[in-house]
Image: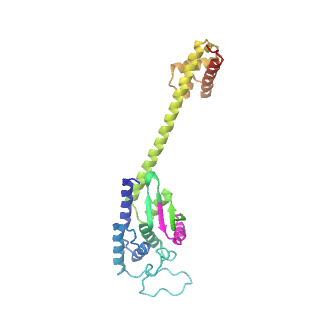
C-alpha cells in the first residue's frame, strides 16, 4: 500500500477505536472481542482497551438471553472473564445468546485486535488472523450475519478472509465506520474509473494504429494498381471506394460507407479486393 493508503487505514482504525458504546453490554462484548490482546496493539487500540477496562469495573453485568429449555441463569453479580478463564476471544463470546448490537460490538473488537485491511491498487482485502480452532467458528458467525468469508490455515494460524470490496464495506459500516469508509470507497471508485478509462484509451489507441496501418496498405495498393493500369479494370464499386479512400485517407470504414451511401461491408470487401489484387500482381511480376 502507498503511504496515503496506510494513513487512511490507520484513520479508519482510529475512528472505530473512538466509538464509545452507550450500552454496557456492547462495551463488554467489545472487551471480549479484544481478548487478552496487547501483543500488537497500536496506541489507539491500547487506549480503547484501557477505557473499556475502566468502564467495565462499574458497568452492570449484562444478562445473556437464555435459550429455550436452558437451565439456571448465571449467578447475579458474577462477571465473565474469558481471558482469565483461558478462553479465546472467539470461544469466550456467546454469539447465539447476544443481540445484533452486541455481536457488532464484538466484531469491532475482533477487527481491532486481529484484523488487517489492505486497499492497495483499488483492491480491498480484509483478514482476521486467529487460532486454527477459532477460524471456522469466526467464519461461520460472519456467514450467519450475512457476510460469508473464507478461511484457511496459514503458517499454523487460522486466517479468515474477505476479498470482496462490497462485503468489506458492509462489514465496516455495520461495526461503526462512516466518514473514513466513505473516503476509502471514493478512492476505490476513482481508481476503478481511472483503470477503466486507461483500458478504453489503450483499446482506442490500438484501434487507431490498426486503422492507420490498414489505410496505408490500401493507399499503396491503389497507387500500385493505378500505375500498372489495373485499377480501371476493377468493378465500379471497387473504383468508387478507391477514389473515396484517396480523398479521405484518414476516414474509417463507416465514414467511407456513409460518404458513398453503401453498406460498410461493401467498403470492406472492396478494400480487401484492392489489397489482394495488388499483392497478387506483385507476386506475379518477374524479378528484374
Q: Is residue 120 above or below residue 231?
A: below
Is 123 on the left or on the right of 273, as rendered?
left
| Count of all numbered marks drawn on residues in the image | 0
In what quadrant of the picture does the N terminus appear?
Answer: bottom left
Q: Which residues are magenta?
A: 126-148
Residue farthest toward the top in the current orientation of the protein:
229
Is 231 on the left or on the right of 95, as rendered?
right
In what quadrant of the picture does the C terminus appear?
Answer: top right
Q: Is residue 52 above or below residue 74?
A: above
Q: Quadrant of residue 112?
A: bottom left
State the image coordinates of residue 55 (x, y, percent, origin top left).
Answer: 34, 77
State the image coordinates of residue 263 (x, y, percent, origin top left).
Answer: 61, 27
Instruction: Say which of 149 and 59 sits in front.
Output: 149
- Does the magenta segment cover residue 136? yes
Q: Is residue 35 above or below residue 164?
A: below
* Residue at figure coordinates x 48%, y 44% from the top left: 196
Query: From where the camera sits, is residue 19 visible?
Result: no
Amino acid at each position: 500500500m502507498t503511504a496515503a493508503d496506510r494513513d487512511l487505514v490507520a484513520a479508519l482504525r482510529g475512528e472505530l477505536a473512538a466509538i464509545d458504546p452507550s450500552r454496557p453490554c456492547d462495551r463488554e462484548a467489545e472487551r471480549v472481542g479484544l481478548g487478552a490482546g496487547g501483543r500488537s496493539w497500536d496506541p489507539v487500540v491500547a487506549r480503547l482497551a484501557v477505557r473499556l477496562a475502566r468502564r467495565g469495573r462499574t458497568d452492570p453485568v449484562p444478562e445473556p438471553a437464555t435459550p429455550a429449555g436452558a437451565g439456571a441463569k448465571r449467578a447475579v453479580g458474577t462477571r465473565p472473564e474469558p481471558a482469565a478463564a483461558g478462553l479465546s476471544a472467539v470461544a469466550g463470546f456467546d454469539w447465539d445468546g447476544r443481540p445484533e448490537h452486541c455481536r457488532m460490538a464484538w466484531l469491532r473488537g475482533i477487527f481491532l485486535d486481529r484484523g488487517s485491511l489492505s486497499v492497495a491498487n483499488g483492491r480491498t482485502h480484509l483478514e482476521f488472523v486467529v487460532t486454527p480452532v477459532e477460524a471456522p467458528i469466526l467464519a461461520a458467525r460472519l456467514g450467519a450475519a450475512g457476510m460469508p468469508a473464507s478461511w484457511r490455515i496459514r503458517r499454523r494460524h487460522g486466517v479468515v478472509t474477505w476479498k470482496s470490496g462490497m462485503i468489506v464495506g458492509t462489514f465496516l459500516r455495520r461495526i461503526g465506520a462512516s466518514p473514513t469508509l466513505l473516503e476509502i470507497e471514493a478512492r476505490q471508485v476513482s481508481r476503478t474509473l481511472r483503470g477503466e478509462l486507461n483500458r478504453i484509451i489503450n483499446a482506442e489507441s490500438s484501434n487507431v494504429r490498426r486503422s492507420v496501418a490498414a489505410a496505408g496498405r490500401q493507399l499503396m495498393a491503389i497507387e500500385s494498381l493505378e500505375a500498372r493500369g489495373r485499377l480501371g479494370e476493377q468493378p465500379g464499386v471497387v473504383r468508387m471506394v478507391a477514389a473515396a479512400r484517396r480523398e479521405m485517407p484518414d476516414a474509417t470504414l463507416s465514414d467511407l460507407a456513409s460518404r458513398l451511401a453503401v453498406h460498410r461491408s461493401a467498403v470492406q470487401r472492396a478494400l480487401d479486393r484492392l489489397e489482394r489484387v495488388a499483392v497478387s500482381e506483385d507476386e506475379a511480376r518477374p524479378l528484374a
